[in-house]
Image: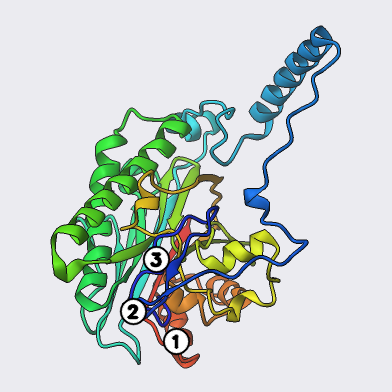
Amino acid sequence: MSDHGGPGGQARSEARRPVHDDEGEGFSPPTLEAGRPDQEAMTPQPPTVPKKAVEVSTLSSWQHRWRGFWRRLVGTTGTSPAAPNRDLSSAHRATGQRPMTLRVGVVSTVGNYREHNEDNFYLPTLAGKAMGGGTGHRDASLEVPGDGGSQNLFIVADGMGGQLAGEKASQMAVDIIPKEVSRRIGPGVADEREIQRAIRDAVAAANQEILGLSVVQTEFNNMGTTVVLTLFRGDRVFIAGIGESRAYRIREGQIEQLTKDHSLAQALLEAGTITAEELPNHKFNHVLYLYLGSKDARTGPEDVRSAEVRPGDRFLLASDGLTGVVPDAQLAEIVSRSDDPQLTARSLMQLALDNHSKDNVTCLVIHVL
C-alpha cells in the first residue's frame, strides 16, 4: 500500500466508525457536509400500497417473463440472484468457437524506497504458484489453455502491517485462496452463481485464517492484505477484490476498472462529500475500511463480478504501487501497444518507478488469444 505501515483500520463504510491511520493513532472520519447526507445510511421510504393487487401481479408477471427473455438473449453479468444459470462448460461447444488461450506476464519488485516486498502473486504454474515477496525483483510468464477450469486463477495481494507481517498476510492469501477455490469448483461445476459463491467463500476462508493468526502471534498483530483475483471459465471471467489492488479490462484500447477501491476516501466520494478531482490526493485515499485480516471481510468480497471474455481482451491486475502513480489512460496505452504481456508488465513497472512510486510494485498482465 502506498505510504502504509499497516492496515487502515477496521471500520464499516456504512457506519463510518473510527479507523486507524498509518501510524496507528486513532482518528474520526470527517463529518459529511450539511445538506449532503450519506446516501448509504439513508433509510428507504416504504413503497406505496397498490390499489389493484391483481393488476400489479399481472404486470409483475409479464415483466418477469420479459426480463427472463432479455437475459437469455443478451446474457448477464454481476451477481444478481435473478441471473439465469449458465453452463460454462458447454459455452464453446454451443458456438463452435475454439477454446481461448491465456498468455500471461507478471513482475513484482520491492521498488526504490522500501526495504522489503510485501506484495505476492499467484499463477497456475506447474509448481503450483509463483510468488513475489523478498527484497528484490521477480517475474514470470506462461501460457495456459483458456478452458483450464479452476486452475485459470490469477491473484495479486498487497500486504500491510510492515515487512514480515505484511508479507505473511499476502503470502497466506495466495496460498489459501487457490486451494479453497480448487476444492469448491470441480470439473462439473458450471453454474455462474455457484462459481461466484465458491470464490466468495474461498476468500472468506483466507480472511478467517489471516485474522486468526494475527490474534495468536504477536509479531503478526494487525496484519492484513488486499487481494484482487480473476478466474477464467469458458467465455466468462470472474473478478473479485478487497482493498485497493485493482483489476482492469482493456478492450480495443478502452480501459475499464472492474473492481472497487475500499478506501475511506472512496466512501466519501460515493457519499457525495468529496469530488472525483479531490479523490487522488485526499488524505484518506489509502486508509482502508475493508481488507483481508479484518472482521468486516468475514463474508468475503462485497461483489464477485462476472464478465464476458473475447479474444483480444487484455486484463491487468496490479497493486497500488502502480495504479497510485500511473493514470488509467497511460495504463491502457501501454497494455494495448505490445503483444508480449511480459514486456508490458516490465514496462508498467518501470513507469511506476520512474514516477517515483514509494511502494512495492506488482503488475500481472493477461492476454486472451
Residue type indicated by callout 1: Ser
Determine whether label 3 and label 2 are within 8 Å by CB: no
Name the residue beneath numbered marker 2: 5
Give the amino acid at mark 3.
Gly
In front here: 209 or 129?
209
What is the tally of numbered marks visible in this picture? 3
Taking the image as shown, residue 154 lies to the left or right of residue 32, namely left
* Relative horizontal placement of residue 140, taking residue 349 as reference (left or right): left
Residue bearing the label numbered 1: 357
Q: Which mark is residue 366?
A: none
Q: Say which of 35 and 180 sits in front.
A: 35
Estimate the x, y position of residue 193 in percent, counting from the top left.
Answer: 46, 32
Label 2, residues with CA under 10 Å away: few <14, some 14-19, many ≥20: some
Residue 329 seen in the figure:
yes
Q: CA distance from mark 3 to mark 2?
A: 11 Å
Element under disc 3: loop
Q: Residue 332: x percent and y percent?
A: 59, 72
Q: 10 Å neighbourhood of mark 3: few (<14), some, or many (≥20)?
A: many
The answer to which image quadrant residue 256 occupies is bottom right
Q: Residue at x 47, y 79 (%)?
A: 348
Q: Seen in the image, is 99 located left or right of residue 122?
A: right
Using residue 178 as the reference point, say whether residue 289 is left or right of it: right
Q: Between tags 2 and 1, which lies in front?
A: 2
The earlier-in-sequence mark between 2 and 1 is: 2
SS at mark 1 in the image: loop
Residue 28 image offset from top left, x and y in percent: 50, 70
Residue that numbered label 3 is attached to:
9
Q: In terms of sequence position, does the residue under pointer 3 or pointer 1 come before the other?
A: 3
Q: Is residue 242 above or below residue 20?
A: above
